[in-house]
Image: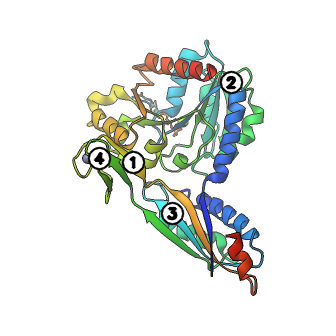
Amino acid sequence: MHELSICQSMLDIVERTMNQHPGAKLKTIRLDIGKGSTIEPILLTDAFAIITEGGPFAGVELEINSIPIGGSCRACGKSFTYQELALGCPECGSTDIVIESGMELDIRELEIDEPEGDTEKGREEE
Amino acid sequence: MTKINVEKKIQSDNETIAEKNRRVFTDGDVFVLNIISSPGSGKTTLLEATLDRLASEFNILVIEGDVTTERDMDRVRAHGAGGIQINTGGGCHLSANMVSEVLPDLDLESADLVFIENVGNLICPATYDLGEDVRMVLLSTTEGDDKPMKYPAIFHESQMAVVNKIDLLPYLPYDIERAEKEVRVLNPQCEIMRVSALKGDGMDEWCDWLRGKLAAKRAG
Ligand SMILES: Nc1nc2c(ncn2[C@@H]2O[C@H](COP(=O)(O)OP(=O)(O)OP(=O)(O)O)[C@@H](O)[C@H]2O)c(=O)[nH]1
Ligand SMILES: [Mg+2]
Ligand SMILES: [Zn+2]
């Protein structure tokens, strides 16, 4: 439901980052989105298309890396990821577990084309 | 093709403003609770019942978040609260920015407790820190005992979970132990309490918890 505002916040960060690379063309945005984060990748992709339409980021590719809910068990010591969230450790069934991933809402990286002859400068800034 | 490493939380702008709010609240020496639940779980009823018990002891402010109407604000005012209504106009959650905009209108200096009633929704408010001291999720027996696992983020992000409407337990197939177990699996540190805001069960314990939180914050 809040994919539009999450998308807008994401684009604010992208815009600020791109301002540090004048003349560069944005190609791809890579996100890490946890499966428990309440953000639905399809809706986020839709929101992205709607917000960027007709603007400088129209047609930019949005790559969403979907991160499963995972954690570790304090009873058997194993780490695990869930296909589907369940009440306890998939190995031993203990409910003494710690959820460690799956809530991410992160921008990981951008892929850009530097303006002609400016490639070296861009690499240094990296 | 050049790669730029960003490695940033999408919510980092909201978090920056939330930290500012937190400093304002701390300067005002108030304890702030952000209450999140699905529509109709009893957030406003819990606030009314809390006001009836604590309004003579503490100065209480409420920030009401609703899509539209002042109805909830009118209800808590009638029970002795000050505060302000935020209408999100379609927005499904409060953001740190919306809260920061109303802070100048609140008399935090003379307040003790600040309750933020978020928009009724278990999904979107989970990812918006408002600058509160404690994020609390309110469950109720009428909505089914399977909600924590269905909405994991809010339970993972909350420090307190309260199960409301326990007066209805005899009439509902609600397994309260199961609901609480699901909360613990998602968040072993989360405190859990049971109340009936309407009938008063558990309300003494609830009020003591609030007193304890305020005292702990003021003790630094
Ligand atoms: N039986 C029973 N009913 C309750 C209890 N608490 C609230 N209710 C009822 O639940 C309904 C919804 O309560 P509200 O307090 O308006 O719920 P809310 O969470 O503030 O709702 P929104 O602000 O619209 O999201 C009302 O009819 C209340 O009387 C309770 O402890 N027991
Ligand atoms: Mg309400
Ligand atoms: Zn195990």
Residue B97 higher or lower than B196, as above or below: below
Report the residue marked by disc 3. Answer: A32
Q: How many residues crowd mark 4 within 10 Å: few (<14), some (14–19), many (20+)? A: few
CA gap, disc 4 to disc 2?
Answer: 42 Å
Q: Residues within 10 Å of mark 1 (few under 14, many from 20)?
A: some
| Residue tagged 2 | B29
The amino acid at mark 2 is Asp
In depth, the one of B67 and A104 nearer the eye is A104
Q: Chain of mark 1?
A: A
Inspect this view and state whether residue A56 appears. Answer: no
Q: Residue at x 76, y 69 (%)?
A: A19
Looking at the image, do the residues carrying marks 4 and 1 touch, with CB atoms under 8 Å apart? no
Looking at the rendered structure, the kind of residue marked 1 is Ile
Q: Please give the chain letter of the residue carrying mark 3.
A: A
CA–CA distance in space, label 4 to label 1: 13 Å
| Residue at which label 4 appears | A77
Quarter residue B183 falls in: top left
Mark 1 C-beta to ligand 3 under 8 Å: no
First in sequence, mark 4 or 3: give its number: 3
Amino acid residing under circle 4: Gly
Q: Earlier in the sequence, mark 4 or mark 1?
A: 4
Residue shown at 61%/45% (left/top)? B94
Circle 2 packing at 10 Å, graded few (<14), some (14-19), many (20+), is: some
What residue is rendered at 63% in x and 16% in y? B58
Residue A99: image tag = 1
Kindly indicate whether the residue at mark 3 contacts the one at mark 1 (C-beta within 8 angstroms): no
Mark 3 lies on a secondary structure that is strand
Q: Secondary structure at mark 1?
A: strand
Residue located 34% across and 42% down the image: B185
